[in-house]
Amino acid sequence: MQTYSLNLIRLMADNAFEGVVLIDSKGVIRFTNPSVCKMFNYAPEELEGQHIAILTNEFNENNFLIENLDTFSKNIFGIGNQHKGIKKDGSEIIFNQNIDEIVLDDGEKVYLYRIHNISSFYEKNSANSDMTNQLITANTDLKNKISKLAEKEQQLRKDISQLLNALEFSRNLSDIKSIFVSTVSDSFRTPLSSILSSTQLIGKYKKAEEQKNRERHIKKIETTINNLNNTLSELLNCKELDEKNVIINSEEFDIRDLINDVIAESKFILKKDAEIVYNHEGENTHLISDQAKLRDIIENLLTNALKFSDGKEVEVHSKFQDEKLLLRVKDHGIGIPKNDQPYIYRRFYRAGNAIGTKGNGVGLSIVKKYVDSMNGQIQLHSNVNEGTEFNLSLPAILVPSEIS
């Protein structure tokens, strides 16, 4: 068996990064290295001659049975476990420990008690716990927002009720009412169920390492709320269009900036591998027109294109020609059957191949109403499984670049 000199062991211990305590077979400390003294806030002379129990409650003078160490493989004691030590001031330190048997040159068996301080690891865990508490608070705030959204949904139900009363004077009332109630119910039932499901799942992810799961469901809730807000806006726009004539509010703006803003806001509904390609032809980009209504027109056309393009590229093009703004929105999706095309601008109407896709059938009716109110024109070109293209021509006052 290899033997070691006491001086050599002390030299190696003094240069070790981890804490090292040399103890005899009775657990009495022969010497400690500087790392141990720093960990426990003792001077070397305060520890030498003391029992190892001064540093840890793992042992005391009555239960230090050194012969039990032989039962551990490779002479390692407590590996993989966490132990508590006691500093000079009585505070605790957390560490990993192991014990190696060493034979000195004179034949005496001593034991090298090595200590690795892991207190900082537990402090980080405590910080993660604080982060978890912050996340719980954020989740509570999110639930409050969902509650407020539910209140809006209740108000919307009242608006729907008023709208249904107005439809009593229309022909084919029973068919229209059935389509409307079914469409609106589906528009809210599925998203609200999705929000409820994600909220319940968030509550089950309590560990710090489950943060990605929590973020995924929070993102899902945010996307669903955005969809609900769009649905609310469309339905409320329908109600307003019935109640009064459309008023045109002209102002100067940059068409390229407006379309880029709409595209940026549409990113949350992009499917995998989908892409929006926008091109403005010409140097002039400023015009005078109704910016708010033009935004609604572009939003509805782009939303439909993304919804039915099955992840394929969507093209948006704009240019000025003969005192008109020309817009084109084109997708390469499922297309619109020929027999459905004469009716697509009717409110709540949905093409036969669109029934399985989420929607309320009001977006294109709003587009048509606004285009007509602005004395514009809209044309449709579509073939099943090839795609759909909308071309718009809207009167616009062009503002030359040097003036704008």
Image (cartoon, rainbow, N blue to C red):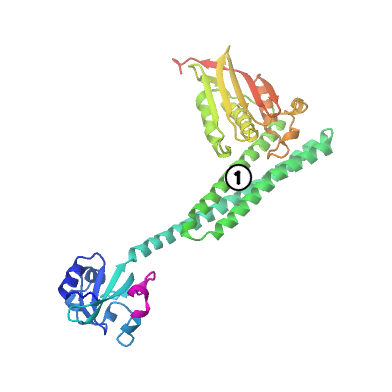
Residue 349 x/y as whole percent = 75, 33
Location of residue 378 (image quadrant):
top right
What residue appears at the point 58 percent right and 26 percent down from the top-left corner? 315
**Vertical order, 65 against 171 (above or below):** below
**Vertical order, 237 against 148 (above or below):** above
**Residue occupied by mark 1:** 224
Whether residue 92 appears in this view of the structure is no
What residue appears at the point 62 percent right and 25 percent down from the top-left corner? 330
Residue 99 is one of the magenta-drawn residues? no
Residue 312 x/y as whole percent = 60, 32
Apparent side of residue 40 relative to residue 338 in the rendered image (left or right): left
Report the label total. Answer: 1
Location of residue 61 (image quadrant):
bottom left
Of residue 263 and residue 247, the one placed in the foreground of this image is 263
Residue 303 x/y as whole percent = 62, 33
Q: Which residues are magenta?
A: 69-84
Of residue 291 and residue 67, the one placed in the foreground of this image is 67
Residue 324 x/y as whole percent = 59, 15
Apparent side of residue 18 relative to residue 198 in the rendered image (left or right): left
Q: Which element is circle 1 on?
A: helix
Amino acid of disc 1: Thr
